[in-house]
Amino acid sequence: MPTNTSYNKQDLKVLLLEGVHPVAEDIFRRDGYDNVTYHKTALSESELLDTIRDYHFIGIRSRSQLTESVLNAANKLVAVGCFCIGTNQVNLDAAQSRGIPVFNAPYSNTRSVAELVLGEMIMLLRGIPAKNAAAHRGEWHKSAAQSNEARGKTLGIIGYGHIGTQLGILAEGIGMKVRFFDIENKLTLGNAEQVAELNDLLSSSDVVSLHVPETPETKGMMGQTQIAQMKQDSILINASRGTVVDIDALAQALEDKRLAGAAIDVFPTEPKSNSEEFQSPLRAFDNVILTPHIGGSTQEAQENIAIEVADKMIKYSNNGSTMSAVNFPQVSLPEHDNRHRILHIHHNRPGVLTQINQILSENNVNISGQYLQTQGDLGYVVTDIEDGSSQTALDKMRQIEGTIRARILY
Ligand SMILES: NC(=O)C1=CN([C@@H]2O[C@H](COP(=O)(O)OP(=O)(O)OC[C@H]3O[C@@H](n4cnc5c(N)ncnc54)[C@H](O)[C@@H]3O)[C@@H](O)[C@H]2O)C=CC1
Ligand SMILES: O=C(O)CCC(=O)C(=O)O
């Protein structure tokens, strides 16, 4: 049901890129946000610089890069939706300092990734990718050499989060032993065992699968040294981020027949669209499954993501709630029927709340509810008011030193 607001929703422009599931557009339109532009592809940085200034909301997946310069040009931007898990394609600090919350869907595609990796692992343990490629060329490789059951083998998971844990459970279901390495102490599910040292995991696993986010620490974490620590004839799977594995070092290990195979879904440089050629030294290897960053690309996941992220963006626009924003103080707000709600985003420094309340008091505004949350350098104060001159109060609040932006909802 569309909600009444202090602004005309048709004046707010929404840009949805990268073929996010069309249900996202339906959800915006159903709520009264009729001004939606939908593109199947990503936009380059220069295209974004030209375009983004007109939009209040942008929805992207992993290809569009919202750099500091792009965000600088985004004068009207209210919120960003990443229709995926990863948010490394957005300069989160730059968005935060401009008072722009970034939302994502932290769970909706995790099962899809875990299922894909399980399938790839079984295929690679049987040597199927190479036999399949040979059969396509007319060759007949009927042999059990280097073809193994998954049962009894050890899976080493790096990053035991939402995907890693699900993969662990699925792998135990087919009789694998699961070990994992994580920088946090994790509750182990099933019979999984946490190991303290990465090299212990690498040297004891028949299959190593990466499920870490892109951070300064994970960049290049599987380099030449780490790949050399893996067991002879083991398998490497990466469906996390392309920067985590040194592709040249992996190609060398495959060339040297140190590894039996690999499955790679993410690459340091990925084509910007389906019409661009995919370049990688791994194309030379029949025993490598190469997939175009589709770990989370299932109908089920994409639809769930579209619903989750579009709902979060609309809720923020209509109501001010920021629950699960990745770079913003998180506030879960009740509805504000019959009340005006002032949202004040500011640099987190002492005295701002006092000044807000002073302004409200001076303008005879009665506060019916107030919510304050901070994160890092950012403060977010939401005030529900019952009477008095809310617009005058808002105008004065905008003058408070440290204010980034403020708006009113009714
Ligand atoms: N291929 C695809 O289509 C998809 C890829 N992804 C990628 O998978 C990543 C993981 O997803 P989730 O499991 O949902 O994330 P998560 O945040 O639930 O789990 C990540 C885990 O990695 C651990 N970790 C962080 N830094 C580490 C380090 N240096 N060494 C070891 N462990 C470390 C964390 O403590 C956490 O347990 C995402 O960040 C995203 O980049 C996610 C979905 C789809
Ligand atoms: O769907 C996409 O474009 C990217 C999926 C992904 O890598 C993620 O969710 O982090």
Image (spheres, rainbow, N blue to C red):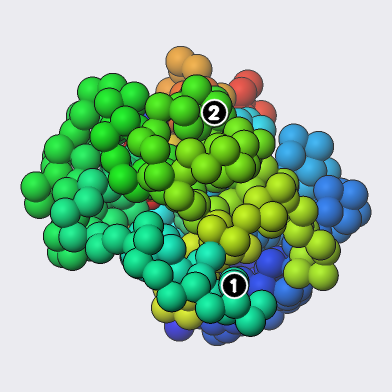
Who is closer to the viewer here, 163 or 82?
A: 163
Estimate the x, y position of residue 108 in percent, counting from the top left. Answer: 39, 65
Name the N-terminal-most of marks 2 and 1.
1
Q: Residue at x 40, y 27 (%)?
A: 229
Q: In the structure shown, which secondary structural element does the residue marked by tag 1 occupy?
A: helix
Q: Quadrant of residue 54?
A: bottom right
Up-down relation of residue 238 to residue 150 (above or below): above
Estimate the x, y position of residue 264 in percent, counting from the top left. Answer: 54, 53
Q: From the viewer's perspective, tell me whether residue 380 is left or right of residue 47.
A: left
The quarter of the picture where the N terminus appears is bottom left
Q: CA gap, disc 2 to disc 1?
A: 29 Å
Q: Are marks 2 and 1 in contact (CB under 8 Å)?
A: no
Q: Quadrant of residue 106?
A: bottom left
Q: From the viewer's perspective, tell me whether residue 66 is left or right of residue 192.
A: right
Q: Residue at x 53, y 78 (%)?
A: 140
Residue 390 seen anywhere in this rendered image of the structure: no
Q: Which mark is residue 223?
A: 2
Residue 41 seen anywhere in this rendered image of the structure: yes
Who is closer to the viewer here, 197 or 39?
A: 197
Nearer the observer: mark 2 or 1; the answer is 1
Decide: few, some or many residues near mark 2? Use Cα within 10 Å; few <14, some 14-19, many ≥20: some
Q: From the viewer's perspective, tell me whether residue 348 is left or right of residue 246.
A: left
Q: Residue at x 82, y 70 (%)?
A: 275
Estimate the x, y position of residue 125 in percent, counting from the top left. Answer: 36, 59
Residue at disc 1, CB closer than 8 Å to ligand 1: no
Q: Which mark is residue 134?
A: 1
Q: From the viewer's perspective, tell me whether residue 127 is left or right of residue 8.
A: left
Decide: few, some or many residues near mark 1? Use Cα within 10 Å; few <14, some 14-19, many ≥20: some
Q: Residue at x 74, y 39 (%)?
A: 67
Q: In the structure shown, which secondary structural element does the residue marked by tag 2 occupy?
A: loop
Q: Amino acid at mark 1?
A: Ala
Who is closer to the viewer here, 134 or 174?
A: 134
